[in-house]
Image (cartoon, rainbow, N blue to C red):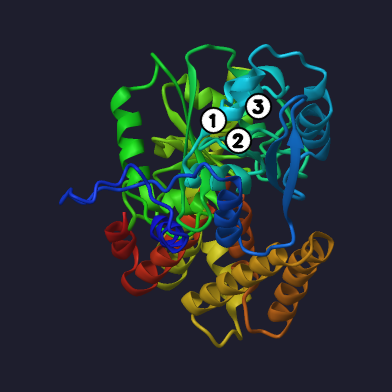
Amino acid sequence: MLDYLYKKLKFLQLKNPKINNESTEEETVEPELSFSLKDNLNILKKILGSSNDIIYREFSFGSKLQINAAVIFLEGMTEKTTINETIIKPFMYESKLYNLENESELEFGNLSIIKNALISVGNVKQTSIINELLDGCLSGDTIFLREGSKDALIIQSKGFETRAIEEAKTEAVVRGPREGFCENIATNMTLLRRKIKNHNLLFETMQIGTQTRTSVCIVYLKGVVNPKLIKEIKKRLNRISVDAILESGYIEQFIEDAPYSIFPTVGNSEKPDSTAAKILEGRAAILVDGTPFVLTMPMLFIEGFQSAEDYYSRPFYASVVRILRFIAFYVSVLAPATYVILSTFHQELIPTTLLFTMAASHEGVPFPAVMEVGVMMITFEILREAGVRLPRPVGQAVSIVGALVIGEAAVSAGLIGGLTVIVVALTAISSFVVPVYTDVISILRIMFLVLGGSLGIFGVGIGF
């Protein structure tokens, strides 16, 4: 990007005073503006192109002096009321009502008078670096340029449409706050600030992605978090070199400790209360603009069996529920392999009555138990994926009706035993109890099924 800007500046034959031609060392030079308003507009127009949503508004202001100026903003990314009432109107009309004793200083490019007397916006930044102006404009801010000044103003005027704060879809609770994060990073920062009203809560923002320039914010509680953790997070974020960051999952895969592990080492949450609780425990969070999922690190294995609702319920019930999650995890991972092991290798471990029942249900089925379970597991994964990708009303019908119809038809046709359908159904239900490890459970389930189907109980032991 800098090379591209530098070529544009060289094309217009604008000299940068910061460049020392006699220096032999390679230095990174930030392209800057010139004192000519016309040249500055030409530079920005050549860089930004002829996109129809970029507005260039030129005007003059001043009571005694007529100074040429211009504002640049993106239509649809800015709030028009802010631009019209607090930027353009004060310059064109109210500037003539001011009796400024030092108005003559405006002729020499002084922007401090403009910032202090004419712009009624809370956040105004002065800079001459073209890259900073482009980042501000493309983020929804307004750029103010004037004749005779080498500096420009970045005026906060963001006003694009965003999704309202809604209940978190992936972390439903019976008791607790209903609000969830949205796609606007500023709104997400506000949600965390409302939870933790502490001056030590710090937000550090950077931009990642050479093409998208996505805003990424590190959130932590100073005095509680380990400084080494923040240092390591910044180190891993700074070494990310990629064109686009469109979701927090991109960041997660770049900074996680064990990229080849099936277990996640970076947590994610859609609920502000869960994220705030982890920050208060001394962890750090990463907000990414454009996604409601916030990353938290470091992540412990036990977190997958916890829920924010556990801390809002009485301890006895919460403890029992957490134990049930552990049981459901192991049932979902080991149930198919255990069924195959008992029915194929170790029938002596099955009670006699149950053994007769299993033999009767499996009578006429032409496939071995491991193939039965494998086919049903693959069918379940297909139905689950179809239910997720289809529209919600249709997806629910496909997942429920499809499972009932296919299971009943397979049993009636003699392709699958009835007990096999029960085992796979129990496995599927148990996997939903621990949603954090749903993907992990699917992989482990297949691994243990293969080991158990080939080596029996010794294969499961090897798997552990």
Amino acid carrying mark 1 in the image: Gln
Circles 1 and 3 in contact, beta carbons < 8 Å: no
* Quadrant of the rendering where the C terminus is positioned: bottom left
* Left or right position of 306 against 234: right
Residue 106 appears in the rendering: yes
The quarter of the displayed image where residue 174 is located: top right
Measured as percent of width and height from the top left, residue 196 is found at 58, 17
Indicate the secondary structure of the residue bearing disc 3. helix
Give the mark nearest the N terminus, 2 or 1: 1
* Left or right position of 156 against 372: right
Which residue does the numbered mark 1 point to in the structure image? 126
Look at the picture and state if 366 lies above or below 166. below
Label for residue 191? 3
Look at the picture and state if 368 lies above or below 396. below
Label for residue 154? 2
Label 1 vs label 3, nearer the camera: 1
* Quadrant of the rendering where the N terminus is positioned: bottom left
Measured as percent of width and height from the top left, residue 122 is found at 67, 22
Residue for point 32% across, 48% down: 239
Residue for point 38% across, 13% down: 223
Q: Report crowding for label 2: few under 14, some 14 to 19, many 20 or more residues within 10 A (C-alpha).
A: many
Measured as percent of width and height from the top left, residue 183 is found at 66, 44
Q: Report crowding for label 3: few under 14, some 14 to 19, many 20 or more residues within 10 A (C-alpha).
A: many
Amino acid carrying mark 3 in the image: Leu
Q: CA distance from mark 2 to mark 1?
A: 6 Å
Circles 2 and 1 in contact, beta carbons < 8 Å: yes
Indicate the secondary structure of the residue bearing disc 1. strand
